[in-house]
């Protein structure tokens, strides 16, 4: 016997008429309504919403290929030329080569006393016109390791007094030392880069020091939001950090990182820059700024220079390398030709495909491809 269902009743799972009710009552012995897993009868759940499906034809595809090619190629050329105009000079001072002035410091350890020093002379062939950024670079150093990245206490770094004396267990095994909490705790802080780099210009055998600015190298949000010193009744950091000890590999405690109060403790900018972990094993981090004094002279003139290095950071044990990089920047950041090459490549491929498809369409597009179907 046929039974009619309305759309609403079908969606709710209740058929009309007495047959469904009596059948349900007989089956369930007077039980409840018949259950169903059918979605509601709505346009969304029944997939009846209006849709638009593009029809790809030669008249729409070919112009798209040519437009993408004509847009991407000039953009790529502009980015590539801008990247090539950035001045950059790099010195590897690891000291693995026997002829390197820093070879004598190759096997230095964290607690070497007195510290090992070396000097590398170099020549800049071209002047650096705008502000110059000095970076230090490390290779084969995996800051992206999961346990390494988690080995920190953000509450402690944010100045929380309770976390200062009771660091997070994520910092193990650099949580405590000699029954005292470590400040700052964790493997990231314990492995902080601590080489000292000084730059001099050589003028007739006279060493003229280049002023290096150590402030303004960290992100504003890190300096003013994420990192704060502990609070208390005094501004004396020695008293505020009382009851804590320095990280194992540090030569001095955190409250002696700098002589200036606004760049000491957890808000020291060298420390903040290091705590922002890198994504790849070969990376660079901003070390110092060299500002241009006037518009009539370049920031770094072409000529001879000398780099004095206090070699404290050991990398030979894990086959790492250390570099010093001098670089200018542009509106797109530092030197990186990849983005320009990528734009040029994609634009060229699209333009080439557009030409190929245009030839194919011109040669075969007018043919009658419909087959005669006999009645």
Image (spheres, rainbow, N blue to C red):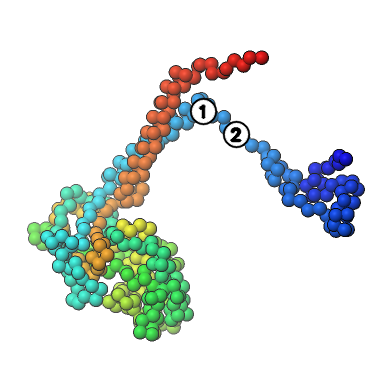
Judging by the rendered image, the residue that carries numbered circle 1 is 60
Rendered residue at 37%/76% (across/down): 174
Q: Position of residue 10 (x, y in %)?
A: 80, 45
Helix, strand or loop under label 2:
loop
Q: Position of residue 150 (x, y in %)?
A: 43, 68
Helix, strand or loop under label 1:
helix
Q: In the picture shown, does residue 169 fall above or below 212?
A: below
Dot label at residue 53? 2
Q: Dot 1, crowdedness within 10 Å: few (<14), some or many (≥20)? A: few
Between the residue at mark 2 and the residue at mark 1, the CA separation in whole angstroms equals 13 Å
In the picture, the quarter occupied by the C terminus is top right
Towards the viewer: 40 or 78: 40
Rendered residue at 83%/55% (across/down): 33
Rendered residue at 29%/60% (across/down): 140
Labels 2 & 1 near each other (Cβ < 8 A): no
Towards the viewer: 77 or 363: 363
Q: In the picture shown, does residue 31 fall above or below 179?
A: above
């Amino acid at each position: 016997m046929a039974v009619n269902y309305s759309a609403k009743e079908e969606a709710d799972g209740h058929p009309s008429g007495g047959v469904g009710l009596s059948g349900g009552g007989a089956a369930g012995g007077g039980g409840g309504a018949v259950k169903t897993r059918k979605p509601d009868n709505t346009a969304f759940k029944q997939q009846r919403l209006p849709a638009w499906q593009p029809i790809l034809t030669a008249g729409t595809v070919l112009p798209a290929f040519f437009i993408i090619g004509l847009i991407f190629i000039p953009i790529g050329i502009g980015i590539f030329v801008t990247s090539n105009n950035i001045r950059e000079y790099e010195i590897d001072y690891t000291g693995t080569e026997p002829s390197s002035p820093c070879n004598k410091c190759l096997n230095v350890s964290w607690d070497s006393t007195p510290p090992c020093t070396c000097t590398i002379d170099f020549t800049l062939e071209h002047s650096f016109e705008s502000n110059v950024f000095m970076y230090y670079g490390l290779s084969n150093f995996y800051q992206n390791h999961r346990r390494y990245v988690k080995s920190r206490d953000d509450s402690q770094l944010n100045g929380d007094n309770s976390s200062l004396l009771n660091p997070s267990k994520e910092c193990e095994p650099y949580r405590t030392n000699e029954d005292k909490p470590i400040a700052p705790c964790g493997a990231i802080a314990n492995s902080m880069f601590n080489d000292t780099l000084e730059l001099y210009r050589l003028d007739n055998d006279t060493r003229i020091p280049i002023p290096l600015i150590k402030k303004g190298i960290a992100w504003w949000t890190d300096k003013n939001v994420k990192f704060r010193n502990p609070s208390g009744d005094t501004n004396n950091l020695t008293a505020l950090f009382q009851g804590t000890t320095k990280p194992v590999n540090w030569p001095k405690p955190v409250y002696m990182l700098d002589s200036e109060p606004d760049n000491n403790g957890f808000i020291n900018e060298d420390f903040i820059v290091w705590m922002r972990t890198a994504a790849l094993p070969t990376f660079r981090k901003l070390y110092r700024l060299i500002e241009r004094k006037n518009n009539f002279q370049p920031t770094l003139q072409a000529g001879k220079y000398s780099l004095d290095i206090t070699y404290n950071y050991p990398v030979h044990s894990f086959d790492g390398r250390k570099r010093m990089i001098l670089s200018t920047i542009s509106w797109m950041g530092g030197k990186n030709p990849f983005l320009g090459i990528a734009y040029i490549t994609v634009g060229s491929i699209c333009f080439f495909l557009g030409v190929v498809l245009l030839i194919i369409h011109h040669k075969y597009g007018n043919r009658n491809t419909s087959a005669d179907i006999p009645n």
